[in-house]
Amino acid sequence: MSYAIIVHGGAWDIPLEEQDGHKVGCLKAGRLGYHFMEEGGSALDAVEAAVRSMEDDPIFDAGRGSFLNSEADVEMDAMIMEGKNLDFGSVAAVQSISHPVTLARRIMETSPHCMLVGEGALKFARSLCMDTVTTAKLLTNKEFERWKRIKADRDYQARRIFEGDPGKLEKRGTVGAVALDRYGLIAAATSTGGTPNKLPGRVGDSPIVGCGAYADNDSAGVSTTGLGESLMKVIPARRVCDNVNNGMTPLDASIETIQYLKRRVNGLGGVIALDQKGHMGYAFNTPYMACASVDVNGKAAVFI
């Protein structure tokens, strides 16, 4: 059986001067995940590797590029899921971790739980001897300057970064990946630093099963991105999978879900999907979404 992967680097108003960087980062992640499967790795290995790559790239809102919250701290969310047994691991509002997606996988594979948050998640990471870092290691100078400008803007709303921001503040997008391996396993993962200037403890859609990601070998794998407060209301990742299970292609399933998101809650975001046959789909209603893929024939593509 062939294998394939699709990744995203966020759906929002990506400035033109940053689009090449998003393409490079997404394509690098997609090729890395595909390489893991070429070498015999699983779809779980592929999505973890792809997302880790983007967590290391400060152009994205995940890991090292995460937004600061209202108290100038970094709190991150992530989840990973496999489609055979519907097992998943999730982490929310965690600090001091370079790769939240790896912590999510460790939760799935080595704990009796599905989700850990905050200080409990960090304690679990330390119990596994995972490396921890300071907030400064996760912070870029541009992010700190952006945070100061947002704090001075009393009218700032996070929605502006998704629908179009005339000020063109430095911004980034949530990251995610979906893969199908040679054994027929589908896996999905999503990682984010959340929205800028969020309240401490805020959790968005990314670590919530069925919202930020979903994987089911009987239908598809999905990763989402966008304004979490709207995405959580419609459970978009699971909706895409249900659409595929009801006979839609991943493309049509993705388009219908984003249309529903807009119609039902005036939501903003994007989805990527991959089914058991290696068919891919994506849709978004923001100005741009950064994506890359490597299909079952080994052909790579990148687009915004």
Image: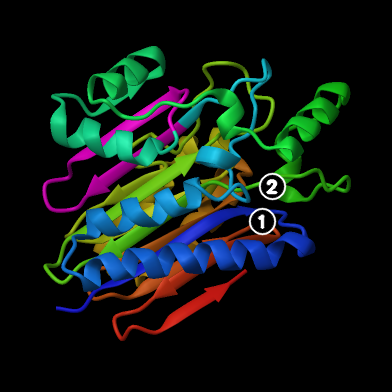
The answer to the question of whether label 1 and label 2 lie on touching residues, with beta carbons closer than 8 A, is yes
Q: Where is the C terminus found, in terms of image quarters?
A: bottom right
Q: Residue 174 versus residue 36: which sits nearer the camera?
A: 36
Q: Indicate whether residue 84 is drawn in magenta.
A: yes
Q: Quadrant of residue 157?
A: top right
Question: Residue 270 placed where, x, y %?
Answer: 54, 55
Q: CA distance from mark 1 to mark 2?
A: 6 Å
Q: Secondary structure at mark 2?
A: helix
The amino acid on which the numbered mark 2 sits, given as a three-letter code, is Phe
Is residue 92 on the magenta stretch?
A: yes
Residue 240 in view: no
Say whether disc 1 or disc 2 marks the residue closer to the N-terminus. Answer: 2
Left of 183 or right of it: where is 166? right
Q: Label 1 crowding class (10 Å Cα cut-off): few <14, some 14-19, many 20+?
A: many
Q: Main structural element of the magenta stretch: helix, strand or loop?
A: strand
Could you tell me which residue is drawn at 26 percent across and 46 percent down?
81
Residue at the spot of label 1 = 286
Question: Please, what is the three-letter code of the amino acid marked with disc 1?
Answer: Thr
Dot 2, how many residues are within 10 Å of its Cα: few (below 14), some (14-19), or many (20+)? many
Q: Residue at x 61, y 27 (%)?
A: 136
Residue 179 seen in the figure: yes
**Residue 302: horizontal and vertical position, in percent?**
53, 74
Question: Residue tagged by mark 2?
Answer: 162
In the image, the segment drawn in magenta is 77-97
Helix, strand or loop at mark 1: loop
User: Would residue 197 appear left or right of 166 to someone viewing this image?
Assistant: left
Give percent across and percent down for residue 299: 39, 84
236 and 40: which is toward the camera: 40
Q: State the image coordinates of residue 159 (x, y, percent, origin top left).
A: 71, 38
Q: Is residue 276 above or below residue 53?
A: below
Residue positioned 52% across, 17% down in the render: 201
